[in-house]
Image (cartoon, rainbow, N blue to C red):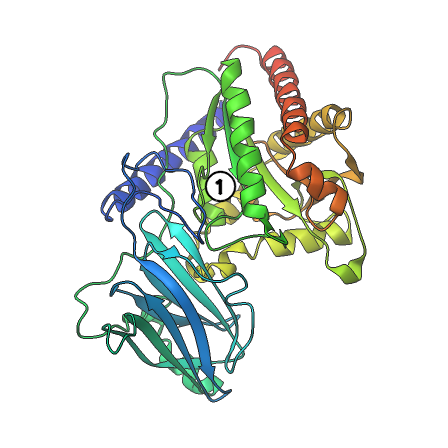
Amino acid sequence: MENRAKHLVFLGCGLLCAAALALAVASAPSAAEGPQDGQPVPATSASTASAQNFPVASGARLAGDDKQTRFILDLDRKIEFRAFPLAAPYRVVVDIPQVNFQLAAGTGSAARGLVKAFRYGLVMPGGSRIVFDMTGPVKIANSYVLDAANDQPPRLVLDFEQVDRTSFVQSLAPESRPELKPAISDSTTATIPAVTTAALPPVAASDPRPLIVIDPGHGGIDNGTQSGDQTEKNLVLGFGLALRDRIEKSGKYRVVMTRSDDTFIPLNDRVKIARSQSAALFVSIHADALPRREGDAQGATIYTVSDKASDAEAERLAEAENKADAIAGVNLTDEPTEVADILIDLAQRETKTFSNRFARLLMDEMKSTVRMHKHPLKSAGFRVLKAPDVPSVLVEIGYVSNKGDLEHLVSENWRNKAVGSMVQAIDTFFAKRLATAGPAK
């Protein structure tokens, strides 16, 4: 009874959190999903049938040196924006309305002056973001939007200046982190809402079927790993959608996706979605890559959470995945600590047992249909797996850095086989769990 009471308390907290988040998102301007980086993306459930006419970014460039560096973004119309710096690591984040980025391949990858690189993409329906990786502490000396003039299109201009560490820290008063006062021109009248968290689907309390949360990794501004024109975020989204369709077709389960389009979702929000929905299983989908200096690796790997990594590769991967929020410029100091606190206070033995059990079942099913890593079961401290009351696994379906794996990852035939084996493991997991659960208390 004590465990049951604890579960109800935490469920209640999760529902209150979900309601607050949904209200926050509802107050923001709604927008349909549009094409990003020149590629069409699926519409969200809040999208309208007709595509919206988003602003187009046609070019981006850097100029200057290691004292002063200018960024210029060519647009087809003036936009509003909000810009602020962050530390650890040093970055500058620019939030803008949803933009159709039609930039040349490789834009942002080359260093210039104070900027090591920059990336761009969708972070939420209606909002895009540009994140600059800086060589050190900087200030935004000037920021404005120019009107079209002299055969030049409207342009967003940012001027970065080098400052010392002391000046930088002094400029970040505690009450102003990370959302500094918007640096916008007098001609603009408003800024876009701060990017907070993902909208959570409603809880279907009357449906007794187990709920499974599928979590395609990365998304939006965070591409994940990449090989040529193939990005991890697109590969795992396609796999996740196929897995959802196959699970729903069986009629045995309810399914919620943490993302069903090219949107960035912070790591803690992915955990919140599972907890607020009282999920019975959380499956995160990724596709790893190894740096060339670390050699080659191939095959699928299944991870469960652990305070101590099972090996160096698992530790490296967890560290890389746990930095996803930093890639999108999210302020990690303001992340809620409820998950960490609960992990300390709550006995997780049952949840970990179920996670490990499902991981073994999944390995047994997948090894008969797809190539597995030489050490297919591993563990590490993945933030996205730290829901204390939801059995969770992270599946690296292959290595985009391995030629053979990449061929499989883009193959519909391979994906169908892998999805089929995962669904079989899910069926076996719930059949055994329901058989041993006994009557509800």
Check the image and report above or below for 12 versus 72: above
Residue 306 at what x, y percent from top left? 67, 44
* Residue 21 in sight here: yes
- Can residue 389 be seen in the rendering of this structure? no
Number of residues whose C-alpha sits closer than 10 Å to that of mark 1, classed few (under 14), some (14–19) or many (20 or more) = many
Q: Position of residue 201 (x, y in %)?
A: 36, 32
Residue at 28% over, 73% down: 183
- Residue 72 is drawn in which quadrant? bottom left
Q: Nearer the viewer, residue 27 or 32?
A: 32
Residue situated in front as seen by the camera: 329 or 79:
79
100 relative to 135 in the view: left or right: left
Instruction: From this view, report whether residue 262 is shown above or below residue 441.
Output: below
Which residue, given by chain and number where applicable, does mark 1 sit on? 271
Left or right of 195 on screen, residue 328: right
Residue 216: percent from left, percent from top:
53, 40
Q: Amino acid at mark 1?
A: Val
Whether residue 390 sits left or right of residue 309 in the image: it is left
Say which element carries label 1.
helix
